[in-house]
Amino acid sequence: MNYLNTGLPAPIPAGDGLDKPFWEGLQKELLLLQRCSVCTGWQWGPEWSCHRCHSFELRYEEVSPVGVIFSYERVWHPVHPALKEQGPYLIVLVVLPQAGEVRMVGNLLGDPRQEVPIGAEVRGVFEHHNDTEPAFTLLHWELSNSAT
Amino acid sequence: MRTLRGRVAVVGIGETAYYKRGESPDAEFKLALKAILAACSDAGIAPEAIDGFASYSNDRSDPSRLAAALGCRELRFANMQWGGGGGGGSAAVGNGAAAVATGMAECVVVFRSLAQGQFGRFGQGPRRNVIQGDGAHTVPYGLMSPAQMFAMKVQRFMFDHQVVQSALRSISLASYHHAQNNPRAVMYGRPLDERTYEDSRWIVEPFHLYDCCQENDGAAAMIIVPAERAGDFAQPPAYLLSAVAGSHYRAGASVHNTPDYATSTFKTLAPRLYEMAGVSPGDVNVLQSYENFTGGVMMSIVEHGFCEPDACNEFFVKERFLAPDGELPLNTSGGNLAECYMHGLGLNIEAVRQIRGQSTNQVAGAQVSMVISGPMVTPVSASIFGAEGVL
Ligand SMILES: [Zn+2]
């Protein structure tokens, strides 16, 4: 079962191809983020050049989907028809220490009314949407100390 | 020294009636014309004499069309500040002022017109089947409205500094309090108390309903002329002491990756704002601080040096923010929460009104009047107006 009700816009790679490897990686259950081939710095969100050394030699490198909750929000008011019957849900901003502290947005699985501990470790959970056109995969998070 | 201080003055202000979203009987462009004509009438200036336009947030009322409609003799300046939200409010004032101060134009109108009922709404998610670009990394997770974009920053700030909800509440209560004296305010006659705030529904934690701005229809305009001509018009001039715009290092890094995250985006701007104006926070008599959401006001006030970040719970109490006697009268027209969400230009107009002594919540003898525009977006902006006596 998906975390959010179906019907939200499906993510597709940017028309200019900037984040295509990222979305293809998620479908294969791989988290691929940008890393500079010259200065080895990580970068997210995606950009065409490295903000540190201005190289265009950025590759997508696999990162273990493990992070720490940097901030969160519990949404109550739906702003999209697909979420009308959803009830509250949790969005987390997760920082990845092993990838230069870049951050990613996702949902926090589990009880949407739970206390959310900023600073707690989370691990990634891939959510496949294979029945949609186009098919896509989202990356959610769950507390590392939670039972699976 | 290169500066805008004292080089130009606002000599005319104008507003349409303010409506709830979708309730304007007038087309958006007609609203723009009405506000500009009201500002001309206020100044006692012929509309034909306007030779420049400055706006922000991709205003749809095109300057060439406005100049044609108004019969302006000549168009010398047509300027749009990049960036969304109300971050460009004081920037547009600064841009118009820069044009006047440098001789590019003689009489610039800064304006914003908005009829959300006739176009799209701000507070709604996208209605497409697919999404790409930055939004692809947030919208499928249900993060798609301004409230949702900014709650994440405020939550982290409140965590870092142990801020409690009553701090946000004080900002909302002050705006609603002031609106009760302002017949122009959409929330005139609709007071707010602590209990009603606490009982109101969550939009997204930590924002209750009353922490969020309205969505409105209307238009606002102000007229800028060189300081040398400031005495030639019907109203007492409000001189521009300072205007700044911008953001910190990589504020625009996408998917919530700006290095300094829990910020209103003003840390690099505030020192430049005060330096150009030649004032310090203690000199500010009255403050208008853009409320997209109360949390942004709180961080703005902190970053402009009025309060230490760890002292928010003590500082943010309603009484401090009430005109005429509060220590820091705040959003004295009712602001975006309770007067009207004219994308914040109404705040600049209220700041001018305070210098003139014409506010419905007048701070006696206000000489230094400050505006903080559009927190948490990039670029943001801020401005300070002063009476003749502070030049
Ligand atoms: Zn590099």
Image (tube, coloured by chain):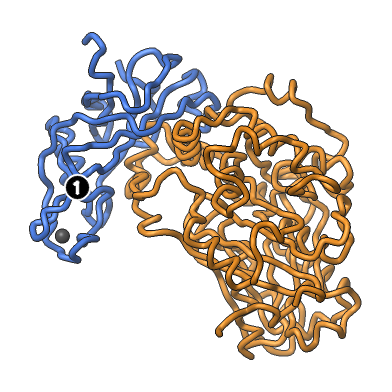
Chain colours: A blue, B orange
Q: Is A81 positioned to the left or the right of A124 in the image?
A: right
> Quarter of the picture for ligand 1?
bottom left
Kind of residue indicated by mark 1: Lys
Residue A42 higher or lower than B124, as above or below: below
Pick whichever, B271 or A105, lies toward us: B271
> Residue shown at 33%/47% (left/top)?
B257
Res A120 visible: yes
**What chain does mark 1 sit on?**
A
Above or below, B203 against A12 in this view is: above
- Residue A87 image offset from top left, x and y in percent: 49, 18
Report whether B157 appears left or right of A94. right
For numbered disc 1, what is the local secondary structure? helix
| Residue lying at 80% horizontally and 87% vertically, measured from the top left | B229
Q: Residue at x 19, y 29 (%)?
A: A66
Query: Residue B263 location, x and y as percent?
Result: 47, 47
For the N terminus of chain B, the image quarter is: bottom right
- Can you identify the residue that label 1 sits on? A20
- Write the residue at 70% across / 26% down: B197
Q: Which quadrant holds the C terminus of chain B? A: bottom right
Please provide percent x and percent y for residue B208.
62, 28
Q: Bin the neighbour count of mark 1 within 10 Å (Cα to Cα): few under 14, some 14-19, many 20 and up.
A: some
**Which residue is the extreme one toward the left?**
A37
Q: Please tell me whether residue B300 is drawn above or below residue B15 in the rendered image.
A: above
Q: Nearer the viewer, residue B140 or B98?
A: B98
Q: Nearer the viewer, residue B340 or B317?
A: B317
Left or right, residue B238 beside residue B189: left
Place of residue B312 in the rendered image (x, y in percent of width and height, measured from the top left): 59, 37
Residue B212 occupies quadrant:
top right
